[in-house]
Amino acid sequence: TPTTHGLMDIMNNIGETIYLECCTETLFERLNKDKEKRPMISILSEESLRRYIVNKLEERRLFYKKATHTICNDRGYCVDKIIDVLG
């Protein structure tokens, strides 16, 4: 992950990086739908999952914000935006 041992800085030095930013509710809907396939969250209640998402976003935000580009991905229609960014 970009939070590991300066990996985000390494990725930025090699090329373009893109943070596909989503609001907490979008992440909750996506994760909750398939949470049984994800061992780290499979046993969490809905409330616990929401707290988990908020906590992880807070922990990782500084790393994610180092990305060269940030694209809102709440609606999932980001392919054209990514193509424009990478042009």
Image (spheres, helix red, strand yellow):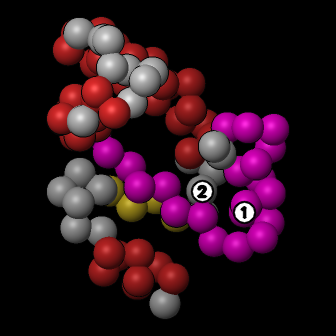
Amino acid on which disc 1 is placed: Asn
Report the front residue among 86 and 30.
30
Residue drawn at (32%, 45%), measured in percent from left and top?
22
Residue 37 locus on image (x, y percent): 34, 33
Residue 83 locus on image (x, y percent): 41, 83
Which label sits on residue 12? 1
Residue drawn at (73%, 61%), measured in percent from left and top?
11
14 magenta-colored: yes
Residue 76 locus on image (x, y percent): 23, 60
10 magenta-colored: yes
Residue 79 locus on image (x, y percent): 32, 75
Write the start and end of the magenta stretch as one range: 3-24
Amino acid on which disc 2 is placed: Ala
Question: Disc 2 designates what residue?
Answer: 67
80 vs 51: above or below: below
21 vs 87: above or below: above
Location of the N terminus by quadrant is top right
Report the front residue among 47 and 72.
47
Report the front residue among 58 and 51.
51
Residue 64: name its quadrant. top right
User: Could you say whether the residue bearing mark 2 is in a helix, strand or loop?
Assistant: loop
Res. 84 visible in picture: yes
Q: Residues within 10 Å of mark 2 (few under 14, many from 20)?
A: some
**Contact check, label 1 and label 2, Cβ < 8 Å:** yes
Residue drawn at (30%, 80%), measured in percent from left and top?
80
9 vs 38: above or below: below
Res. 54 visible in picture: no
55 vs 2: above or below: above
